[in-house]
Amino acid sequence: MAFLLSLRQRRERKGTEMFKKILIANRGEIACRVIKTARAMGIKTVAVYSDADRNALHVRMADEAVHIGPAPANQSYIVIDKIMDAVRKTGAEAVHPGYGFLSENMNFAAALEKEGVVFIGPPSPAIEAMGDKITSKKLAMEAGVSTVPGYMGVIADADEAVKISGEVGYPVMIKASAGGGGKGMRIAWSESEVKEGFESSRNEAANSFGDDRIFIEKFVTQPRHIEIQVLADKHGNCVYLHERECSIQRRNQKVIEEAPSPFLDAATRKAMGEQACALAQAVGYTSAGTVEFIVDGNRNFYFLEMNTRLQVEHPVTELITGVDLVEQMIRVANGEKLPFAQKDLKINGWAMESRLYAEDPYRGFLPSIGRLTRYRPPVEGPTAGGGIVRNDTGVFEGGEISMFYDPMIAKLCTWGKTRTDAIAEMRLALDTFEVEGIGHNLPFCSAVMDHPRFVSGEITTAFIAEEYPDGFTGVMLDSATLRRVVAAAAAMNRVAEIRRTRISGTMDNHERKIGTEWNVKLQGESHDVTIAADRAGSTVHFADGAEMRVESDWTPGQPLARLTVNGKPLVMKVGKAPSGFRLRLRGADFICHVRTPRQAELAALMLEKSAPDTSKFLLCPMPGLVVKINVAVGDEVQQGQALATVEAMKMENILRAERKGVVKAVNAAAGASLRVDDVIMEFE
């Protein structure tokens, strides 16, 4: 990598003795991430866990673990006294807060300071100044930093929010002052949306951060979300580790990130970096932090907020700079100087990150919970294509995804020499990633990697809304890829046929002859092919005279097929289906039928089965807790009217009427726990 500290440099002791034991006040993949670096530095670690996380991966990885309470975060992970008790019990000398939970809570940092325990993050006054979005925007304005128009005071209620929104001008962004990660955030285009959004944002903020303060700012249309990573020590040194592009978002939460940005030029990058460092130094900031900007089409940038913690997407910065940010946070907290200057920090290659969420992209990205019956990430490290694969995760096969926490379960990262290379590596890594048992967004991430607009780099934060206005419904493979899949399916079917026709494992005397002519149907297209097989593979001939060579060691029952078609790799997830396979690749998910010509002829005469009519029911779209029922039996409802609110994974989801109707029955009440497709209410 461009700037990678040597092992000797990493282990040098500068000044005070390095910590012997640190506690990670977090869970999931970020807790595992911190543990890995601490272990490499020879530091022992302490994990904390709730009832729901008793068997979690971060608990298994740590040297010690302390139980801190019930599953809800407001009864465990964000209760300062419980974390402090764990610190005292284990004798931890320092605490790394990860991100979310207490990471930007100045009271937590102050409590640690009072106890004589080092907070691996900025000092509490800097958290107070920059961690609070209202205060940070005021300070930025005073420092001459360009900011987005808005109201920086605390808003008392929904009526005041409506008044302020009218003055700022629609659309507006309603945001939790102490928020992050998309929690407590809504875009409102009208008075009614402000009223609803204000209450939901305030509730989410209280549940996620223990702070329900809300502010409002102008929502800049067609923006790009670009952020600068800064790192400052206690000796007056501050550097920026370049930028990350985070414009691919849904529900204001990032899904795909990359570093560097395909949009910035060197001059803008330098200006943003220097401004970010100046802002950090103005408030005495130390440790790793991120200054977020909105950038318009003319590369004008506006300060958005500062996150006084490690960001979820920090791995892409590490991949292009070679700097371990967690290690530097620990060393800065220990009083060490930064071992590099700004001139040392070059950009090497390109990095992509896809956040793997336990959510169903086919159902509006609603959360999904359950057990991971299969969880096989791609192999980490150097790839055959000259790139790198990295997967930061906090789960394991057989583990359970809980409804109580954020739905992100892994961060898949790839590095390549160019942006094109990094995207190509990500495509292959996503196709290789096996996840079963829950709904997940791997198909959507794959679809983004192939989308022409993303590939061109012409993206904004409105990408998902603009490109998938009716929701994500999957991908239709292009004709070239489709033909490769047809050839692969035909060759795989031949292997499956050989397995099916063998008797008692003998081959010579009891093997029935396998036909060479087949019909392959997928994505509504039918292809007649002929197969010529040999020991090395199969040559598939199409009716129009084209042919494709397929080679693979796939055997029936394997859920992942790695093939080469005409010398190029093809990876598909394979499942059982009548007369063929269920195939998944590049965001597409379909049934592929492989039949004899006669079978295909008869299948064409079969009627399609109709889906059941559920139009008279309001079904629960995700497992969750009913927060509110807005209507009663006999009420007449209008299209778009709010019917109920269901909370899942710390997010409130308002369910609305799809059409005009009258409520016939209400089958759920506030406080009820529901499963997917449970009937909430019926209509006449």
Image (tube, grey):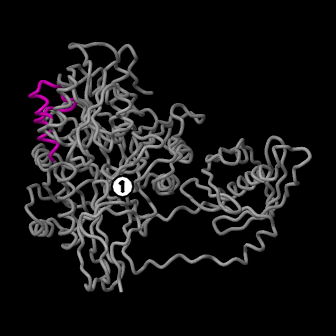
Circle 1 Cα neighbour tier, 10 Å, few/some/many (<14 / 14–19 / ≥20): some
How many marks the image carries: the answer is 1
Residue ID at (42%, 33%): 319
* 381, above or below 352, in the image: above
Q: What stretch is highlighted in magenta?
A: 109-132
* 460, above or below 635, in the image: above
Residue 228 at least partly seen? yes
> Residue 165, how many percent across, how many down?
15, 67
| 402 left or right, relative to 166 | right
| 639 left or right, relative to 361 | left
Quadrant in which residue 576 is drawn: bottom right
Residue ID at (28%, 28%): 46
Which image quarter holds the N terminus?
Answer: top left
| Residue that numbered label 1 is attached to | 249
| 338 left or right, relative to 433 | left
> Residue 108, how many percent across, how many down?
14, 37
Residue nearest the viewer, comparing 306 with 677: 677
* 637, above or below 345, in the image: below
Residue lying at the far front of the rendered structure? 504
> Residue 187, how many percent across, how many down?
25, 63
Residue nearest the viewer, comparing 393 with 503: 503
Residue ID at (36%, 26%): 37
Quadrant in which residue 531 is drawn: bottom right
- Main SS, magenta region, reads helix
Quadrant in which residue 107 is drawn: top left
Residue lying at the far right of the rendered structure? 509
> Residue 211, how many percent across, how many down?
14, 50
Q: Is mark 1 on a helix, strand or loop?
A: strand
Residue nearest the viewer, comparing 467 with 434: 434
Q: Is residue 116 magenta?
A: yes
